[in-house]
Amino acid sequence: MLNLVLFGPPGAGKGTQADFLIEKFKLIHLSTGDLLRTQIAAESELGIEAKSYMDRGFLVPDSIVIGMIKSILQENENANGYIFDGFPRTVEQAKALDILLDEMDTPVNGMICLCVEKDELINRIIHRGKTSGRPDDQDVSIIGNRIHVYNEKTKPLTEYYKAQNKYFKIKGVGSVEEIAQRVIDTVATL
Ligand code: AMP
């Protein structure tokens, strides 16, 4: 199995790059943001709870996202591997992922971090908000909060993966194809 954590702040292009990796390496794309938005659209109990955090730009509680990931991993034991997009976002989630994958006798092979400056992130998210319809893409203060939460809670995860020699930093600016090539070249070394 090939298991990749696609990492970076909101607006770094994780979803776009995930599409290239799925195609190239035939992996299952696991985006917790997409999974949560599906629950919101279905107006499930989980979705209603998650929405109250997401609309304000805060993280959904660890127990909810870890539970979602766990059931998907259990349903796809014979997969080629996974792209974790937007997960893990806390050290607690990273530890839970290691335990879940360990139970399947497979590790996280690498954490690919897409680096983009804050002003560029805000511009990209505002632009995406015009078509995404996402409430959290349309308000500058909520976008600012998402970036703040990333810096406080999620960025420290780089240390977690650096300590395991699994951290790979990629320049996330340039054309989508250029960035994809950088990501693919890095993944090919894993
Ligand atoms: P994303 O689509 O990855 O930008 O995620 C959108 C929102 O969903 C985030 O701002 C969080 O509120 C929530 N979310 C997505 N993934 C996670 C996660 N792994 N842990 C906690 N909250 C998450």
Image (cartoon, rainbow, N blue to C red):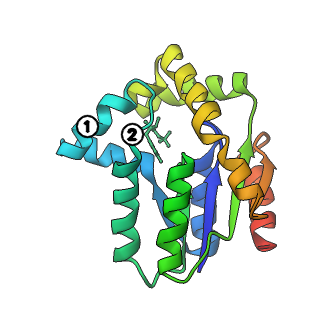
Depth order, front residue of 53/174: 53
- Image quadrant for the N terminus? bottom right
Q: Name the residue type under label 1.
A: Glu
For the point 70% across and 65% down, which residue is it?
A: 110
Q: Is 85 displayed left or right of 159 in the figure? A: left
| Residue 106 location, quadrant | bottom right
Label 1: few (<14), some (14–19) or many (≥20) C-alpha neighbours in 10 Å: some
Name the amino acid type tagged 2. Answer: Val
Q: Which residue is mark 2?
A: 60
Q: Mark 2 and ligand 1: say if the CB distance to the nearest ligand atom is below 8 Å.
A: yes
Quick check: 161 above or below 11?
below
Measured along the vertical axis of the image, is residue 18 above or below residue 118?
A: below
List the residue tagged with mark 1: 49
Report, in whole angstroms, how far the alpha carbon at label 2 lies from the one at label 1.
8 Å
* Residue 156 drawn at (x, y percent): 67, 42
**Under tag 1, what secondary structure?**
helix
Left-right relation of 173 to 157: right
* 2 or 1: tag closer to the N-terminus: 1
Image quarter of residue 107:
bottom right
